[in-house]
Amino acid sequence: MSRLSERAWGYLLAAPAFVLLGFVALAPIGAALWLSLYRRMPVFGLDEFIGAANYVQLWSDERFWAACRVTLYFTTLSVTAELVVGFGLALLLDRLTSRSGRSSPWEQAMVLLPWAVPTVVSAQIWKWLYQPDYGLLNYLLLRVGLIDAPIDWLADPDWAIHAAVVMDVWKTTPFATLLLLAGLKALPQDLYAAATVDGAGPWERFRRITLPLLMPIVVIVLVFRTMDAVRVFDAVFVLTGGGPGNTTETLSIYAYKTLFQTLQFGYGSALATAMFILVAGLSALYVVLLRRHFQESA
Amino acid sequence: MAEVRLEHLSKRYGATNVLPDVTLTINEGELFAVVGPSGCGKSTLLNLLAGLDRPTAGRILFDGEDVTELEPRARDIALVFQSYALYPHMTVRGNLAFPLQVTKRRHGFDRRRIEEEVQKVAGFLGLIPLLDRRPRELSGGQRQRVALGRALIRKPRVFLMDEPLSNLDAKLRASMRAELRRLHEELKITTIYVTHDQTEAMTLADRLAVFNHGEVQQIDHPHEIYARPANMFVAGFMGYPPMNLLDAHREGQTLRAGPIRLPLAETGAQHLLDQPLIMGIRPEVVAITSVAATGEGAVSGIVRLVEPSGAGMWVTVDLQDAQAMTVIGLTEAGFIPNVGDSVAVSVRRASIHLFERATGKRIGSA
């Protein structure tokens, strides 16, 4: 036994983890890939190998491309807003806690709260807020006089997706805030004193010192949030169920409906695989960006 | 270049009075050191001068102009940090150019002009081959140079330095000290140099202020501070090894500190001597010799600690016939005592400092 090299020992000891990972991650992915090459609809007793036919169908499926557009629109909008709002909140919290010299748990708890609530629960709460007749949002807007008549936010094809974006931003901004705040806390204060004395104003300090030094964390936030947003399901599903029409139908929702409502296992798996490829592609892009950034600063 | 004047400057944080009341003037073109133990308020003073912090009361004047309420960027000062505070994501060139880039609007330097200035400063400090490196690729001494260059490039009115050499090893520190002195001779920018290292302050500064508990203990030229310390704190803080401070009193025409007796020389203020005194004797005028070679007026003691220092040795001796009185002295060349040896201690009548025991204030020399 002891004749095994250190490397071999390493693999041997890591083997249980590999096996576990294989069962819970790799095997299902492989199964879905395999399934996507079949036409399998148990209701009709169909189960035949059709090769890439599902993917050919996908290519000409208008609903698939619409779902792609909705997903990317949702992702771009919500991730951008989360990053911007999250950065603002992180700067504010950093300022609050560094000025008083101690970190108050209250402000942080308040910012973190939305993230702690399960998505389904917060989506349901937002659904009530958006409710056209009794919802708080319409009531407030009417009282302030910004609108003349109640808006049915979730039933209006133009508003629905944005209503979902707002809810998602509210819910997941704390994640961005937390990561960015940790990054801000780790920045040496000397650099700010130096920049101040060198003559840099607040905006220049942010642009020339804070932003470049926090870039790795910004990219990490982008990676995590993009992957989450591309796969968004529960938030939108609870709010709109993909409607009105299919205007808020994301890839996840389309795949879910195909797989579990219409029980087209083969085609649904092809959809899931397409989504997998999209997420993998986006992550690869980010990883390349991150690596380039580190190479530049190393 | 500017004259810097502090008028009744004070700073308190909550209940702690870090700087009770400081008034001092730093002459134009002077290299002025502020020295004191940690927590003496010297860093607070520097932050106030830089504008990173606001005083509780008092004024700061540059050439008569009140800058107390001005933002750091409006004061035209440069600050060299103990940690250097180089921007880690910028190259040496970027670090040097930064102060000019962010103040572009004020002096209207375009990109080419900034590059010229960078080249000039980099040439001056020998940084040209390092311009495209990042701080982490530099040695401590090189980083120090970049920090200096970044401070110099704007040609500030006042140059502030916060323990700039304390992160360097001993040898490099000595050479950087010489370099700082050279820079100062060439540029003649008013420089305020904060340090806890009294040797650094003594060797570098034109004048220096010794601080303790936020209060100025003495302001003078280095040799004056060494020769005529204003009080016991300055006497004990400036110089290494520290001055021997011994309880003493007058007995007729003799000064007596434990077994040490010294005939009293003519001093103007005889009446001040009839009170409990402290006698200050620099270790370099205390001769430690073998008992055999005992001269007149020598007392004997037991060696407790021996500290070799180049030519001679610093020896800590417990004096005999005295309650816990120890003296540090210098051996003569060739004499190497061991711990526990009996030795003779004699005080050369070069300069004895006398202080009031009650207040610690200097009375005079004897």
Image (cartoon, rainbow, N blue to C red):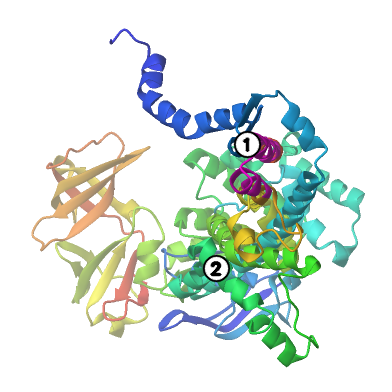
Residue B14 seen: yes
Position of B185 with respect to B195 (left or right) is right
Q: Are the residues under marks 2 and 1 on the same chain?
A: yes
Q: Amino acid at mark 1?
A: Phe
Task: Determine whether, in the image, residue B189 is placed left or right of residue B267.
Answer: right
Quarter of the image with the N terminus of chain B is: bottom right
Q: Are marks 2 and 1 in contact (CB under 8 Å)?
A: no
B96 inside magenta stretch: no
Q: Principal SS element in the magenta part?
A: helix
Q: Amino acid at mark 2?
A: Ser
Question: Which percent across, then down, holds residue A61?
Answer: 80, 41
Q: Quick one: A220 or B323, which is closer to the camera?
A: A220
Q: CA distance from mark 2 to mark 1?
A: 39 Å
Q: Which mark is residue A44?
A: 1
Check the image and report above or below for A209 versus A92: above
Q: Position of residue B32 (x, y in %)?
A: 59, 64
Residue B44 x/y as whole percent: 52, 71
Q: Is residue B181 visible?
A: no
Q: Quadrant of the C terminus of chain B?
A: bottom left
**B202 left or right of B119 in image:** left
Give the residues drawn in magenta, as a range.
Answer: A254-281
Quarter where residue B268 is shown:
bottom left
Which residue was labeled with disc 2?
A122
Image quadrant where residue B260 sits: bottom left
Q: Which mark is residue B136?
A: none
Q: Position of residue A287 (x, y in %)?
A: 66, 37
Residue at position x 56%, y 32% from top?
Answer: A29
Q: A75 or A6: which is nearer to us?
A: A75
Crowd class of label 2 (few under 14; some 14 to 19; many from 20; radius 10 Å): many
Q: Could you tell me which secondary element the residue under label 2 belongs to? A: helix
Please tell me whether mark 2 or mark 1 is closer to you in this view: 1
